[in-house]
Image (cartoon, helix red, strand yellow):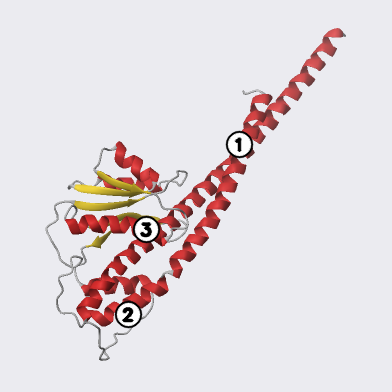
Amino acid sequence: MASLRDIRRRIKSVKNTRQITKAMELVAASKMKKAQQAALAGRAYAQLMADMLAALAGRVMDTEHPFLVKREVKTRGILLVTSDKGLCGPLNGNLFKLVTEIKSPAKYVAIGRKGAQFLARTRRDVVADFSVTDRVPFGEVKTVIEFMVKLYIEGTIDTIEVIYSHYKNTLVQEPTVRPLLPLTSVKDFVTHLRAESGGSHQVDDRDMLFEPDAATVLDALLPFYVNRCAYQLILNAKASEHSARMVAMKTAKDNATKLIGELSLEYNKARQAGITQEILEISAASYSSQ
């Protein structure tokens, strides 16, 4: 049995760990709330864009915009969105499993240090890696997407796909592969926008005059759509990261509390056994002296 001093040291160590994990849980909870609010704030923009694109969709019969032209996929372009730090449970590991399932030729762009390290460790074709802060400024995301769009237009990659953690609720974050480009049709991405915004929309069939014409306006709106969609996905990934970290730290705190209880019980038993042993030794010495 461990000595009383060893048990006291373990109890003190576990209490310090519990204090740290509790603080990290509170920080993650605060960041998660801000990330959720940021994701919800983008819905109004999504609704407006869905309305605008829906008005254009029925008036554009054909367009040669490179975002809408489907081509043979020789090299996939993968954007892997992970965290910069660990201590977030199986969040990053689940994303890495999706990456290992990709057997076709692909070029990778990473957001997050954990993803960049994994891609380098597994010797995959990494084109670039970026870092996005917890506030997720749109300018940082736009830089990443414009870099990938440039590769897409040049023909270096034939798709743009995002691997990220889809936020369902505080306890569930689902690893997801979301195709971004090419868009199969205007109708499809209008449907996606409407589904994401969560609002009810009606088709506006009024006669409208577009200057210079509907196809030109649509071509100008498509880059905005790609940037907004990627931005929303990364906001979603950040909310998933903070949720996973909060849950992981809460679990660690609860386990530490449970372990402290078990160690305290062991300490009391050992202390009681020591007292009983001393009483027996005193009684035995008193008896032998008579």
Disc 2 residue crowd, few under 14, some 14–19, many 20+, Cα 10 Å: some
Relative to 135, does residue 210 appear above or below in the rendering? below
Instruction: Left or right? Give the position of 251 relative to 269.
Output: left
Please identify the quarter of the rendering in which residue 70 is found. Answer: bottom left
Q: Nearer the viewer, residue 241 or 17?
A: 241
Secondary structure category for the residue under label 2: helix
Q: Residue furthest top?
A: 289
Element at label 3: helix
Category of crowding for the residue at label 1, using alpha-carbon neighbours closer than 10 angstroms: few (below 14), some (14–19), many (at least 20): some
Of the two numbered discs 2 and 1 on the same chain, state the one appearing first in sequence: 1
How far separated are the C-alphas under marks 3 and 1? Answer: 40 Å
Q: Position of residue 168 (x, y in %)?
A: 41, 61
- From the image, state whether disc 2 or disc 1 is nearer to you: 2
In the structure shown, which secondary structural element does the residue marked by tag 1 occupy?
Answer: helix
Question: Amino acid type of disc 1?
Answer: Val
Q: Where residue 167 sits: x, y (%)? A: 41, 59
- Quadrant of the image containing the N terminus: top right
Which residue in the protein does label 2 denote?
Answer: 51
Q: How many marks?
A: 3
Q: Amino acid at mark 2?
A: Asp
Q: Is residue 210 visible?
A: yes
Q: Which residue is mark 3?
A: 141
Q: Is 92 drawn above or below residue 205 in the view shown? A: above
Label 3, residues with CA under 10 Å away: few <14, some 14-19, many ≥20: many
**Label 3 is placed on what type of residue?**
Val
- Residue 14's disc is 1
For marks 2 and 3, give the one nearer the viewer: 3
Mark seen at residue 258? none
Q: Quadrant of residue 257?
A: top right
Q: CA distance from mark 2 to mark 3?
A: 24 Å
Q: Earlier in the sequence, mark 2 or mark 3?
A: 2
